[in-house]
Image (cartoon, rainbow, N blue to C red):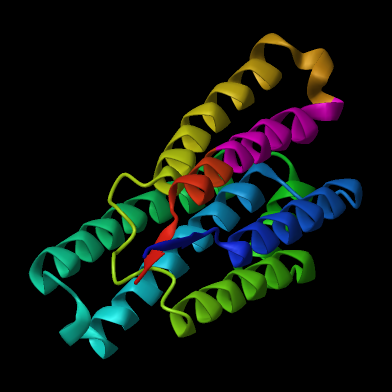
Amino acid sequence: MAVFYPRISQYISLAVMTLLTLLALNQKTISVFYILYLFWWDEFLKTIFDLARYAILKRKIQNPKIYLSIIKSRLFLLLVYLVFIVVFFALILNWRDTDLVLINFEVLFFKNWLFNFSIITFILREIYNFQNDIRGYAPHHMLSKGIITLHMSLVLGMLFWFLVTKKFMFFMDYATLFSVIPFLLIKLFFEIQEIKNRLIREF
């Protein structure tokens, strides 16, 4: 008989990330780069632990070649995203705003404790998932909801930046708020959908 159960660790990690992001927003230590880089690390760590499963549990994987191919594709896509996020969102978008550039570099070099703690919760989640075989030896897909969230956030990030700085300059004082909250809502929506759909079957 098959037993299905939700990924409680995913819900906890998502809740903690949301609370820490809102705290960073309240303390004004957040930027568009912060949230996009955080999403990137979430997907990167998922991929790294998928790779660890391949290295350690290869014999239990049904089709190792396809499994590894998916991981390689995700890593390549994430590398492309990383370059774009760092160059465009950490530097180009905010090069006239010294305060935001400093915030971005603190995040980039792990000097922001809220960001760092969020990363730690991601790592703890993946360790728990790994130890409990929650992935069921299936890698995160190339077009997983997490990747789709990251892609949408990149597009919307550029759109919001253009609208706030070029068309609706009276929103400049709230630019970070209007930029970060939509990303967070998108992340919550897609992650909750993925958690609901990703039920593990035990025999």
Q: Nearer the viewer, residue 94 or 69?
A: 69
- Residue 119 in the image: x percent, y percent? 62, 70
Quarter where residue 107 is shown: bottom right
Say if 162 sits above or below 66 in the image. above
- Residue 166 in the image: x percent, y percent? 65, 15
Say if 85 sits above or below 72 in the image. above
Q: Residue at x 47, y 80 (%)?
A: 132
Magenta stretch: includes residue 185: yes
Position of the N terminus, as image quadrant, is: bottom left
Q: Residue at x 64, y 49 (%)?
A: 35
The magenta-colored residue range is 173-189
Q: Nearer the viewer, residue 177 or 191?
A: 191
65 with respect to 82 (left or right): left
- Residue 2 in the image: x percent, y percent? 38, 63
Say if 151 sits above or below 45 in the image. above
Q: From this viewpoint, which residue is outermost toward the top? A: 167
Q: Magenta: predominant secondary structure element?
A: helix
Q: Residue at x 69, y 66 (%)?
A: 118
Q: From this viewpoint, which residue is outermost toward the right? A: 27
Please count the marks in the image: 0
